[in-house]
Amino acid sequence: MQKRFNWSLWTGGVLVALLVLIGLVGPSVAPYELDFQAKLRNEVVNGKTVIVSPPLPPSEEHWLGTDKWGYDLLTLLLHGAPYTVFVTLAVAAVRLSLGTILGLYLGMQDKPQRWWLAIENAWSYMPIFIPVYFLLKGISVNPLLPTSTLVLFFVGVVGVLGVPSVASSIRQQTEQIKGAQYVLAAVSLGAGREQIIFRHVLPHLKEQILLILVTEMVAIMTLMGILGMFDLFVGGTKMTMDPVLFHSITHEWAGLLGSYRGFVYSHYTWIFLAPLVAFVIAVGSFTLLAKGLREKFEQTYQRMPFL
């Protein structure tokens, strides 16, 4: 059987690598300082003096334009990239590590744990947005806590609340592997539970674990986008009065998207489109990577079904 080129895997892998690179070097290569604001100025155009004031459209001076307050959009996106990429990765890592440990423990039990099955069934109908919203609402708007504490709190809350779904998937896979003939043979020869886990279960779960990691990152970014629409941003929300406006303290991309959503129907659509395109590319990159990994693993097991 001829092996076809996996466009999703390669495209997604390259885009994710670029996102990680931007997250690492973004703030250091930003064209302006974070507190830079374009000011009102006079310019001579066709022999006439005109007043130029923010928001400024995309130009050679500001590649993505500026917002209503004169902040360079490219600078904001580059400074927010580390929070967008690495907070998402941290939450996914928390979910995956705790969910894998719990799923392995439950899957290796001799009898199904009915209490856990009840939790799985109930949690599958619970939109995770609801508990996250009410847990963050009281501390994220005009916060008294430092940004680092708010980020860690977000990672912990969203990570722990997503553990049941990961544990459910790992548990089901573990139960299937545990019932295989070669595992039963190893048990009959005296292999202990730890040996079964590390020699038989985990080697067969490595592809599934990687796929869960990427899939969870898509789900986490989607959740961040929904929270952004409700003015809850990772790292805190700064609310100003008269008029009431919400700004992202960390400038992560979902926060910028939520902050600028009011410009979608204005004449300054670039203010909303810049973070929208960046956020869609980020979510699309991990979605393509997940699709490519799934296709790769399916092709592998079609060629070697005995694995």
Image (cartoon, helix red, strand yellow):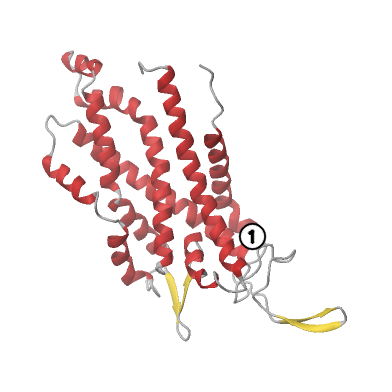
Q: Position of residue 228 (x, y in %)?
A: 43, 64
Name the residue carrying label 1. 30
Outermost residue on the bottom side: it is 242
Q: Relative to 208, does residue 25 appear above or below in the rendering?
A: below
Q: Residues within 10 Å of mark 1 (few under 14, many from 20)?
A: some
Expressed as whole percent of the image width and height from the top left, the position of residue 214 reads 43, 42
At horizontal 34% and vertical 25% (from top left) the residue drawn is: 203
Q: Is residue 233 visible?
A: no
Q: Foreground: 265 or 288?
A: 265
At 39% from the left edge and 31% from the top edge, which residue is drawn?
Answer: 207
> Which residue type carries mark 1?
Ala
Residue that extends furthest to the front in the rendered view of this protein: 265
Q: Position of residue 136 (x, y in %)?
A: 33, 66
Query: Residue 119 versus residue 71: which sits nearer the camera?
Result: 119
| Helix, strand or loop for disc 1 | loop
Tell me the quarter of the picture where residue 155 sits.
bottom left
* Residue 85 versus residue 167 in the image, above or below: below
Residue 64 spot, x, y in % from top left: 65, 63
Instruction: Please identify the quadrant where the C terminus is shown.
Output: top left
Asked if residue 301 is positioned above or below residue 130 in the image, the reply reads above
Is residue 272 placed above or below 285 in the rendered structure?
below
Residue 287 in view in this figure: yes
Farthest right residue?
Answer: 47
Q: Residue at x 51, y 60 (%)?
A: 253
Indicate left or right for 21 with 164 as reference. right
Label total for image: 1
Left or right: 297 as drawn, with respect to 118: right
